[in-house]
Amino acid sequence: MLKDVKSQAPQAICELKPMNGRANLLVTGAPPFDNPILRRAMQLSLDRKAFVDILSEGNNDIGAVLQPPPEGIWGMPPEILQTLPGYGPDVTKNREEARALMRSVGYGPDNRLKVKVSTRNIAWYRDPAAILIDQLKEIWIDGELEVIETANWVPKLMRKDFTVVLSLSGSAVDDPDTQFYENHACRSPRNYTAYCNPEVEALIDRQSGESDPAKRKELVWQVERKLIEDAVRPIIFFMRQATCWQPEVKGLTLMDNSIFNSWRMEDVWLDR
């Protein structure tokens, strides 16, 4: 759509901004997915760069749990991110490790795992879900796409009525608490995978109470590393979104960290 606007309204001013929205892989805790080896294999199968290149022509971002820098304040830099399981640039190597894990739990080319991959029935969800299904075939997981209408989507997640899900989530602000407590705390109703780790819960509380930003960031990265090692709700990519306006619109300031707080219209005026 950004290309369409630029071609049809060349005078328009456009900005492509991060929105602190992410694509998540959600996996049920029911058998066989209660086995962490299987979840780790799924995480290792992901070619995140392919998602980014196909869906946004390379404009989306790759990160862990928190919005990546430079716009994200708390996210890991690339040199640390690439040390995490599944984030290394050698996709072939990652998938070889994933296939070894799949074999260790009894799956292979002659014994493939069939699953339903559920997603919301709009393009922003369906398109990455189709790529996910294609990539899971690399480790002998055959996904069948199940599209759910919008009115039924969140209730389905709340009931944990799914096997594998491609979902999107956003944050109202770039702060670790909004992600950790909402999506990973034991008692959160939006912890759709029902992940509960007392060690991680204690770290989440520690980082929340830490007043020194540098020390807090160290704790935040410890939480992120543990969540990724446990293959909890793997983040596939972070989205960017374009906004365009006519030159006579003045004073519009777009945010870098949320889709919810970008409209300070009290500062906007028309130069006519």
Image (cartoon, rainbow, N blue to C red):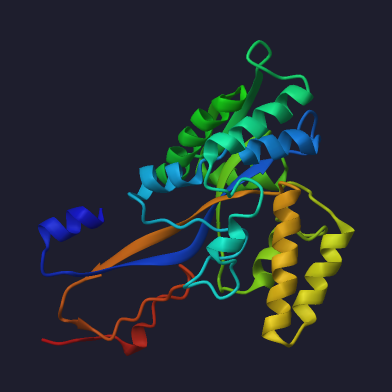
**Nearest the camera: 111 or 1?**
111
Q: From the viewer's perspective, is 194 left or right of 93?
A: right
Q: Position of residue 85 (x, y in %)?
A: 66, 48
Q: Position of residue 153 (x, y in %)?
A: 58, 44
Left/right placement of residue 37 relative to residue 141 reads right
Q: Quadrant of residue 212?
A: bottom right
The residue drawn where x is 68% and y is 35% is: 41
Instruction: Give the percent coordinates (x, y) of residue 218.
Output: 72, 74
Q: Quadrant of residue 252?
A: bottom left
Whether 151 is drawn above or below 38: the answer is below
Residue drawn at x 20%, y 54% is: 3
Q: Judge whether 47 appears above or below 171 on screen.
A: above
For the C terminus, the image quarter is bottom left
Residue 162 in view, yes or no: no
Q: Is residue 261 above or below residue 180?
A: below
Residue 135 visible somewhere in the drawing: yes
